[in-house]
Amino acid sequence: MKKIFLLFIITSSIALSQSYQLIGEIGEFNQASSFYIAANGFIYVTDTGNDEIYMLDTLGNLKKTFGGYGWNDNSLDDPMDVFADPLTVYVADKNNNRIKRFDRDLNYLSSLYTKDSDNPQERFAYPVSCATSNFGDLYLIDSENIRVLKFDIFGNYLLEFGGFDAGTFMLSNPLQLAIASNNNVFVIDENKIIVFDQYGNGISKINLDEKLNSIRILFDNLTVTTNNNIYYTNLSLPNEPLTAIRLYGVDEMPKIVSSIIFNNKLYVLTSSKILIFNKIGNN
């Protein structure tokens, strides 16, 4: 992986674009804020407009919803991000200062809440993103204190990074994080992608010309988005640069919220639906 990190440091250019053709759309949302696709194909979408999370199958059938505005275990307040593996779903419940954990069928299991902890290092507020590593460690963005926190599978605090003492890897306005198969942590921060190892050591940075709003990694397929553009790289290929993605079949592309590549298809989340694209040719 060192080669790709060095590539990120050396160049800020974008490779020639890949092309994708629209083949369909699924879902109906109020104000979708994020989504994730578990390895078993189920799609989870957070909606800040309705303060809900939705579970869909790959055909777009709505299987279950959870939430509604509130403060108790059965409600949400500004769910900003979702991450899912085949067994567990995590939601960054921003204004409730919690990371909520569900089983794969969206049955509520537990919450991680540390705002009243006696340990100031583990206190977080207004979490805006979360994801787990291959080891089950939970990483979250603490937007109040502008840092990333790491907890073990049992909810015990492990470490913080990206804060004011991180030097050139200090975060300024982190919005979302994603974790690669080697457990390196990718954080988008304004127009930058900042990469840390699993111990919180800064590895590399890449600067783009646009403000970033989402980053997703699934099976080492990394997509990063702005309001109008999507860029892609395969992290398993050491010399693979970021590639711009060109979308066809949409008369007027709405604002892009996020994107994921799954089973050779590109899923693009907008505030109201998910657009599904097939790759054109071998470009």
Image (cartoon, rainbow, N blue to C red):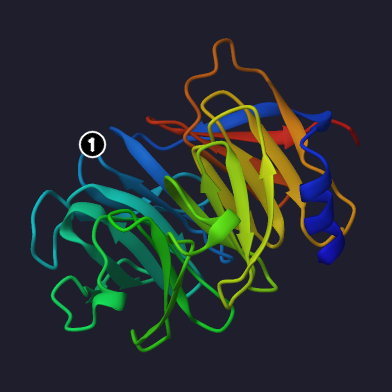
Percent x, y of residue 133:
55, 75
What residue do we see at 16% from left, 59% from top?
96
Percent x, y of residue 279:
78, 35
Q: In screen coordinates, is 2 left or right of 216?
A: right
Which residue, given by chain and number where applicable, does mark 1 sit on? 49
What residue do we see at 47% from left, 35% from top?
257
Q: In screen coordinates, is 196 left or right of 77?
A: right
Q: In this view, does 235 lie above or below 99?
A: above
Relative depth, front residue between 76 and 9: 9
Q: In screen coordinates, is 153 left or right of 79?
A: right
Percent x, y of residue 35:
45, 49
Percent x, y of residue 260:
60, 47
Residue extending farthest top: 251
Q: In this view, does 43 lie above or below 224?
A: below
Rendered-image quadrant of the N terminus: bottom right
What residue do we see at 28% from left, 32% from top?
30
Relative depth, front residue between 100 and 61: 100
- Helix, strand or loop status at disc 1: loop
Quadrant in the rendering for residue 112: bottom left
> Visible in this render: residue 86?
yes
Quadrant in the rendering for residue 104: bottom left
What residue do we see at 21% from left, 61% from top?
97
Query: Label 1 amino acid?
Result: Gly
> Visible in this render: residue 109?
no
The crowding category of the residue bearing disc 1, from other C-alpha atoms within 10 Å (few below 14, some 14 to 19, many at least 20), is some
Q: In this view, does 123 lie above or below 157?
A: above
